[in-house]
Amino acid sequence: MTKVYIENQNFKGINLFEKGLAIGEYENCTFHTCILSNLTLSDIKFLDCQFEECDLSLAKISGSSFQNVMFKNSKLLGMPFDECNKFLFSVSFNGCQLNLSSFYKMTLKNMIFNHCELKEVDFTESNLTNSSFNNCDLYGAIFVNSNLEKADFRNAFNFNIDPEINKIRKAKFSINTIAGLLDKYDIEID
């Protein structure tokens, strides 16, 4: 199968589930209001791309590359990011729904999650050093043996992080969010 190279192209309002997306490399492309849910995106390389108001829920991304990719106001439910190519993996999320997604054992240093729903997302054994969770809902998110050093949780909410099984040195929390570190002790905080 021939791989395509597509550069500087705008995809707008397209239901790619019906047409599919050609395997290859997409550089500096914009996807706006596109439906890619349940689509096989395996082995596709996205470089300097932006997804805005798109639905990528349950897309298959095994072996795909995401390098300097921004997701804005998009739905990415159940995304197995832990199955994509980890080499030069660099993404940011603004206003996205990432519920039930997985970042298991991933290096996510300096990752930016801004105004996102991260309910039941798996961050087990991930390195989130210096990452930011600005105004993010982390209800049921899993943090086990995760490196959260210098991560910013000051405006995050609904998280439950056990300091005994995660690295939290110099992580930032506000007085309003500190209860998320003490849930396992079943104590009352006023």
Image (cartoon, helix red, strand yellow):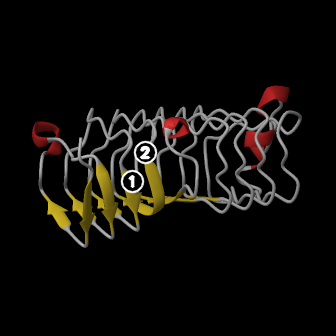
Q: Residue 59 vs residue 105: left or right? A: left
Residue 88 at x, y percent in the picture: 57, 58
- Write the residue at 20% across / 69% down: 9
- Write the residue at 80% across / 27% down: 184
Residue type at tag 2 = Ser
Visible residue check, residue 186:
no
For residue 123, what is the image quadrant?
top right
Residue 171 at x, y percent in the picture: 80, 57
Residue type at tag 1 = Lys
Visible residue check, residue 131:
yes
Which mark is first along the chain, 2 or 1? 1
Q: Secondary structure at mark 2?
A: loop
Front-lying residue, 100 or 184: 100
Residue 153 at x, y percent in the picture: 69, 55
User: Which residue lies under the disc numbered 1?
Assistant: 45
User: Which residue lies under the disc numbered 2?
Assistant: 64
Q: Residue 132 vs residue 117: left or right? A: right
Q: Using a 10 Å C-alpha cutoff, classify the residue at mark 1 as few (fewer than 14 neighbours), some (14 to 19) or many (20 or more).
A: many
Quarter containing the C terminus = top right
- Write the residue at 12% across / 45% down: 15
Q: Residue 82 vs residue 6: left or right? A: right
Q: Using a 10 Å C-alpha cutoff, classify the residue at mark 2 as few (fewer than 14 neighbours), some (14 to 19) or many (20 or more).
A: many
37 shown above or below 89: above
Residue 86 at x, y percent in the picture: 58, 47
Q: Say if mark 1 contacts mark 2, CB within 8 Å.
A: yes
